[in-house]
Amino acid sequence: PGTRVLAANPRLPGAQPGDLLFSPSRGRSARRNGGEDVGAGSSVLQAPDGTVRSVLSNREAGVLDVAAMRIGP
């Protein structure tokens, strides 16, 4: 499990066409070049040219963060 990448919802405040939303997996953090690490529970809204538009909570970004469940005998 690594960083999840989604096309940004156009209704997300500050989002522009083509923007991506990056979210570290549960219990992990992601490194940002020239910026602070982004911890689990946060998402980065990024333009196609790599410009970081904002760092949001997963709740603000509409990212669901659920625990993995394994069912077996």
Image (spheres, rainbow, N blue to C red):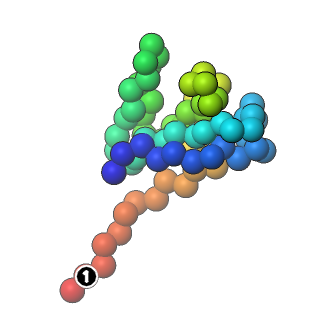
Q: How many marks?
A: 1
Residue plotted at (42% across, 43% down): 3
Q: Is residue 9 left or right of residue 67?
A: right
The answer to whether 55 is drawn above or below residue 3 in the figure is above
Quick check: can you spot residue 64?
Answer: yes
Q: Position of residue 39 (x, y in %)?
A: 42, 34
Type of amino acid at the residue the image marks with label 1: Gly
Quick check: can you spot residue 54?
Answer: no
Secondary structure type for disc 1: loop
Compare residues 6 and 49 and report the one nearer the observer. Answer: 49
Compare residues 23 and 64 and report the one nearer the observer. Answer: 23
Which quarter shows the C terminus? bottom left
Q: Is residue 34 left or right of residue 11?
A: left
Instruction: Find the residue positioned furthest to the top.
Output: 34
Instruction: Find the residue positioned furthest to the bottom.
Output: 73
Q: Position of residue 54 (x, y in %)?
A: 62, 27
The answer to whether 36 is drawn above or below residue 14 in the figure is above
Q: Position of residue 47 (x, y in %)?
A: 64, 29
Residue plotted at (66% across, 36% down): 19
Q: Is residue 18 left or right of residue 52?
A: right
Residue plotted at (38% across, 26% down): 31
Task: Identify the residue position indicated by label 1 in the image.
Answer: 72
Determine crowd level at label 1: few under 14, some 14-19, many 20+ residues with C-alpha closer than 10 A.
Answer: few
Residue plotted at (70% across, 47% down): 9
Q: Position of residue 27 (x, y in %)?
A: 34, 44
